[in-house]
Amino acid sequence: MNTLRLQMRVKHTEGALVRVLSVTRRRRFDLLQLTAVATTDGTFLDVEMTVQAERAGHTLVGQLAKLEDVSEVEILEPSDIQLGVQAAGTRSLTDFPRLH
């Protein structure tokens, strides 16, 4: 089993987290942990999610990046995978502090 820790920025809108979790489940990733903190202006949620699956993590990252509500997503762990996807017209993940 592969365990991945993801960080993403999600619009703070009705149903946004439900859509993220739905894609995660449809891609056959099991959710182990989820933390969501609103940005200071309240327009986004900084989400950190730990998932587990037999599949490669890039399959989930690619699908999450396609969601209209997700502006950025990257794999934080395992450390040997450095894959980040940024949706068009958005800022980099380095523009906001990491969740810990």
Image: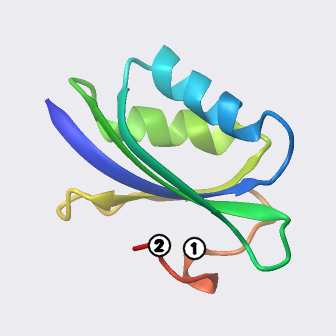
Residue 89 shows in this picture? yes
Q: x%, y% of residue 90?
A: 76, 67
Q: x%, y% of residue 97?
A: 54, 83
Camera-near label (1 vs 2) is 2
For the N terminus, give its image quadrant: top left
Label 1 sits on what residue type? Leu
Q: Is residue 30 above or below residue 58?
A: above
Image point (62%, 45%), residue name: 65
Judging by the rendered image, the residue that carries numbered circle 2 is 99
Q: Secondary structure at mark 1?
A: helix
Q: Secondary structure at mark 2?
A: loop
- Asked where in the image residue 60 lies, by quadrant, the reply is top left
Q: Give the Cα distance between marks 1 and 2.
A: 11 Å
Left or right of 32 in this view: 98: right
Q: Is residue 30 above or below residue 96?
A: above
Q: x%, y% of residue 96?
A: 61, 82
Residue 86 shows in this picture? no
- Is tag 1's residue or tag 2's residue first in the polypeptide sequence? 1
Image point (20%, 64%), residue name: 79
Judging by the rendered image, the residue that carries numbered circle 1 is 93
Q: x%, y% of residue 35?
A: 50, 54
